[in-house]
Amino acid sequence: MAGSSTLIGIVIQMTIVLALVITAAVYLLRKERIALKPMLIGALVFLLFSQVLEKGLHVYMLQLNPVTAAWLQHAWLFATYGALAAGVFEELGRYVAFRWWLKRRRSWGDGLSFGLGHSGVEALLIGVVGGAQMLALAVMYNNGTLQQKLGGLPPETAEALVAGLSGTPLHLYVLGGVERIAAFLLHLAFSIMVLQGVRSRRFHYVLAAIGLHAAVDFVPALYQAKAVSVYAAEAVVVLAGIAGFMYLRRMKKNDSREWLPESDGEKRS
């Protein structure tokens, strides 16, 4: 049975994520006076490059191709592949957006707006939509109807789901909410980094974002492969989020010098 701590934990995690997105949106809209277009493009880029293109590759590599599926049974190969795929798809998505779709929207505020759309949609999908699904499953589990719904799933998947609902302590849900905050800050930082590369016409900024993104995702991917503990995975993301926040503060200090209007003759809309 999913205890009260499980239900409370799921609600706390959902509340943390929802409060994060709303607070960040209100702050950036009022303080930075961000535009809505980059935010919408950021959300679109996440959905297209991460949820469609990247997941399409995962289906092929992990399910449709028996050779790669066998290779990726090894934890370290799986983690390397998963981390690189996330870095390449998401950072190249940012690059495509700033390079071609947002030619007249490349200011500091535009970078933050794009990052808000990208990271906000991710946070809501994982922390709120995913949390609502877990909450519904927990209620069904307590009502005794979940077992009927799991009949079509592989036994190991069903067992893992039941174990998660009945054995996850409250503090891990809270830690998951903190991890979402760190990931949110990190995506803002990557958005600014890629935008800096587009503005300066230095692609190595994009390559750096890909490499750093992959490095951060490597340990969580190892956790998915059950090679490291959840605490190791969360610690890496939280520390990376702190580094992302420090990077944003540093770039904000350079706002007046680094983010002057571009000299390529393009006029902002």
Image (tube, grey):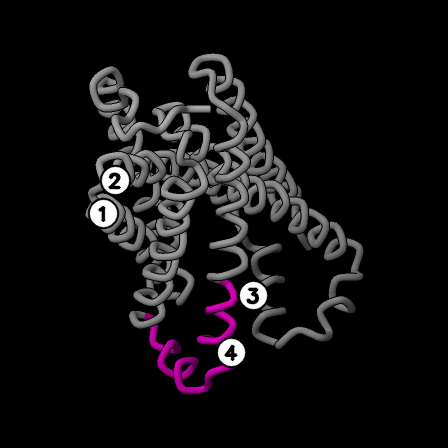
Q: Is residue 73 magenta?
A: yes
Nearer the N terminus, badge 2 or badge 4? 4
Q: Is residue 52 magenta?
A: no
Report the magenta residues as a range: 55-75
Residue 11, horizontal then vertical, whole percent:
63, 37
Decide: marks 1, 3 in contact (CB < 8 A)?
A: no
Secondary structure under badge 4?
Answer: helix
Nearer the N terminus, badge 1 or badge 3? 3
- Residue at mark 4: 63
Residue 38, horizontal then vertical, whole percent:
48, 33
- Mark 4 Cα-neighbour bin, 10 Å: few <14, some 14–19, many ≥20: few
- Mark 3 Cα-neighbour bin, 10 Å: few <14, some 14–19, many ≥20: few
Nearer the N terminus, badge 1 or badge 2? 2
Q: Which of the pair 34/221 is nearer the observer?
A: 34
- Residue at mark 1: 203
Secondary structure under badge 2?
Answer: helix
Can you tell which of label 1 and label 3 is closer to the viewer?
1
- Mark 2 Cα-neighbour bin, 10 Å: few <14, some 14–19, many ≥20: many
- Residue at mark 3: 160
Q: CA distance from mark 2 to mark 3?
A: 42 Å
Residue 229 vertical position relative to residue 80 in the rendered view, above or below: above
Can you tell which of label 2 and label 4 is closer to the viewer?
2
Decide: marks 1, 2 in contact (CB < 8 A)?
A: yes
